Image (tube, rainbow, N blue to C red):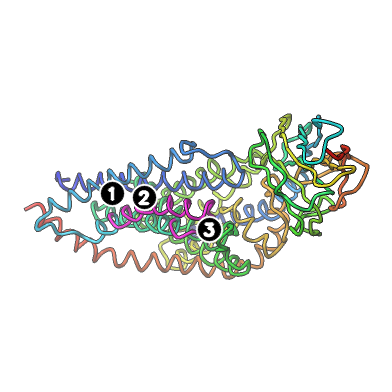
């Protein structure tokens, strides 16, 4: 790797890692809000979130300086995405402060939160694209570090449009309960399939990477959504059992290269969506299926009362969205060949 | 061919195991877990005087405890059935985790210790001091100042409720007079006389 490429690679890596920390910190913060834990500027979830933002900013500076050093200062699209994403992420902070000053407490969906999460999705997608263009074979650990922030940030975006957490004194941005369920049922399976099958595709379908990406998502879920709520800790075995379909899909992709296996893998991982998004998803489906007050200590009971009704009902659209996610990644993989050629041309120009 | 059969069989078994766990085994085991049982108690109530002159302020100090398991929320409510306005009530101090809220007549309140099933319109002023969550063994207190507006007997209703209301002892007192929410209250009063 040349000096410029190394700088660019390090930049993308820092952006991905930073976005991962920010997204995990955000997820932890949502749980603490649900539990009404006293909040200060220096609360642990905030510290994780700010550390992530700092890492993403340093990474973006490296990416930007690499783009300036490039021949004719030409910027490829992953760089543009990273810079745009981090600018959105940073600019959301003063807007959020202004929003709090004007309207007091905010809900999950608010204009500054939307900009912030959009910035995370855009920035982390740019970093992943940059990493995959920077090298012929992205190391397994980096694939996981780069995929997870996209997965978590996009999950946050879906949460905004499906969870009933956005009613405040001045605004009610809560989705209609049925719309919330529709959004969650269609978007989460697509996202899981796209992210997990994407990780496998980036690894050349070698066994283990998809499973590790799924395991990392589960670990983050346990650490940020389950352990902080002591009433849920006994449900950890249930949550981690979702590694089973993930490993099954990984094996299917690694040991069979047929398109049928690809679609089946997409359907299999997507069917785990109702379990992978536990415990928060309880709030979305409760609105339609149970209409109970979801006290944090009752989440597990309400969730397990619903699961036998919900899963059979959503299985077909869920599997269909999982297959669509797999198709989407398949298309991207085909396009990537073109991108690598474009990057090679840019790379040659910058190093001559 | 053999490889494909083994792979298909392994994936199928994995899925059967997974969905059996998720749909039957785990739900059965977790649904049998008892909900937490918080125990709400008002441990101390003191009124600054037993007789006051009209226009004089009365200070009520209340202390609540949770003697059971952690509650997602518990509140201590002080109601004033003789009052229909909120401007003559002040919170002098409190150590609850959240800021106490004043409830004016006309606001919607839950009733019969229920979360959603039935709600009633408040007919008189009350103040709810709460902590969310209220951990087991924790004690919180508040000092409330009120200026009665008429002569005669000035009544104060006091109760505490832990949520979710999972058993009988999640509310205090266990019996007595029912208030506007059809929930038991302890009654205190002072005599308000002409100055």
Residue A349 left/right relative to A276: left
Please provide percent x and percent y for residue A13. Answer: 30, 46
Identify the subunit bearing mark 2.
A
The residue singled out by tag 1 in the image is A12
Q: Are marks 3 and 2 on the same chain?
A: yes
Q: Which mark is residue A146?
A: 2
The residue at 39%/64% (across/down) is A329
Q: Earlier in the sequence, mark 3 or mark 1?
A: 1
Marks 2 and 1: CB-CB under 8 Å?
yes
The residue singled out by tag 3 in the image is A159
The residue at 41%/43% (across/down) is A21
Q: Does A244 lie within the magenta span?
A: no
Q: Earlier in the sequence, mark 3 or mark 2?
A: 2
Residue B72 placement: quadrant:
top right
Is residue A284 among the parts visible in the rendering? yes
| Highlighted range, magenta | A83-112
Q: Which type of secondary structure does the marked residue at label 2 adopt?
A: helix
**Residue placed most toward the observer, B71 or A283:** B71
Please provide percent x and percent y for residue A345. Answer: 14, 61
Residue A305 left/right relative to A69: right
Is residue B45 among the parts visible in the rendering? no
The residue at 81%/34% (across/down) is B42
Please provide percent x and percent y for residue A327. Answer: 42, 69
Q: Are marks 2 and 1 on the same chain?
A: yes
| Crowd around label 1: few <14 · some 14–19 · many ≥20 (10 Å) | many
Marks 3 and 2: CB-CB under 8 Å?
no
| Crowd around label 3: few <14 · some 14–19 · many ≥20 (10 Å) | many
Quadrant of the drawing holding the C terminus of chain B: top right
The overriding secondary structure of the stretch rendered in magenta is: helix
Q: Which type of secondary structure does the marked residue at label 1 adopt?
A: helix
Single out the mark in the foreground, 3 or 1: 3
The residue at 59%/40% (across/down) is A37
């Amino acid at each position: 790797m040349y000096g410029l490429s190394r700088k660019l690679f390090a930049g993308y890596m820092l952006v991905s890692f930073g976005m991962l920390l920010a997204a995990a910190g955000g997820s932890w913060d949502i749980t603490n809000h649900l539990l009404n834990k006293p909040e200060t500027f220096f609360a642990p979830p905030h510290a994780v979130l700010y550390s992530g933002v700092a890492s993403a900013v340093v990474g973006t500076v490296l990416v930007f300086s690499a783009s300036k050093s490039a021949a004719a200062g030409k910027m490829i699209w992953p760089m543009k995405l990273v810079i745009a994403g981090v600018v959105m992420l940073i600019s959301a902070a003063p807007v959020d402060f202004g929003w709090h000053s004007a309207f007091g407490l905010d809900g999950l969906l608010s204009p500054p939160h939307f900009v912030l999460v959009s910035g995370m999705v855009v920035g982390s997608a740019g970093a992943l694209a940059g990493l995959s263009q920077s090298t012929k074979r992205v190391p397994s650990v980096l694939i996981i570090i780069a995929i997870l922030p996209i997965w978590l940030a996009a999950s946050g975006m879906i949460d905004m449009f499906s969870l009933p957490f956005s009613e405040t004194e001045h605004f009610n941005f809560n989705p209609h309960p049925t719309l919330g369920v529709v959004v969650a049922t269609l978007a989460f399976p697509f996202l899981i399939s796209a992210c997990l099958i994407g990780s496998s595709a980036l690894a050349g379908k070698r066994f283990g990477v998809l499973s590790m990406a799924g395991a990392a998502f589960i670990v983050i879920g346990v650490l940020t959504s389950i352990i902080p709520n002591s009433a849920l800790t006994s449900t950890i075995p249930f949550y981690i059992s979702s590694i089973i379909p993930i490993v099954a899909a990984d094996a299917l992709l690694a040991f069979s290269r047929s398109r049928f296996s690809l679609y089946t893998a997409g359907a299999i991982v997507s069917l785990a969506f109702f379990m992978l998004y536990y415990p928060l998803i309880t709030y979305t489906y409760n609105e339609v299926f149970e209409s109970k007050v979801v006290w944090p200590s009752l989440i597990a009971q309400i969730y397990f009362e619903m699961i036998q009704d919900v899963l059979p009902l959503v299985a077909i659209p869920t599997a269909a969205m999982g297959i669509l996610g797999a198709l989407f990644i398949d298309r991207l993989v085909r396009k990537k060949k073109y991108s690598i050629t474009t990057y090679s041309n840019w790379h040659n120009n910058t190093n001559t | 061919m053999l490889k494909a059969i083994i792979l298909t069989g392994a994936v199928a078994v994995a899925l059967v195991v997974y969905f059996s766990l998720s749909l039957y085994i785990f739900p059965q085991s977790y649904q049998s877990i008892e909900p937490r049982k918080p125990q709400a108690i008002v441990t101390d109530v003191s009124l600054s005087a037993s007789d006051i002159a009209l226009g004089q302020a009365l200070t009520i100090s209340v202390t609540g405890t949770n003697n059971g398991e952690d509650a997602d929320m518990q509140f201590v409510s002080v109601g004033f059935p003789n009052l229909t306005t909120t401007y003559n009530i002040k919170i002098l101090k409190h150590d609850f985790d959240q800021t106490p809220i004043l409830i004016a007549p006309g606001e919607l309140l839950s009733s019969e210790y229920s979360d959603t099933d039935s709600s009633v319109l408040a007919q008189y002023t009350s103040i709810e001091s709460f902590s969310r969550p209220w951990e087991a063994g924790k004690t919180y207190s508040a000092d409330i100042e009120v200026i009665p507006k008429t002569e005669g007997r000035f009544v104060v209703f006091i109760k505490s409720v832990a949520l979710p209301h999972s058993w009988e002892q999640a509310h205090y007192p266990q019996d007595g007079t029912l208030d506007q929410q059809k929930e038991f209250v302890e009654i205190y009063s002072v005599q308000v006389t002409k100055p």
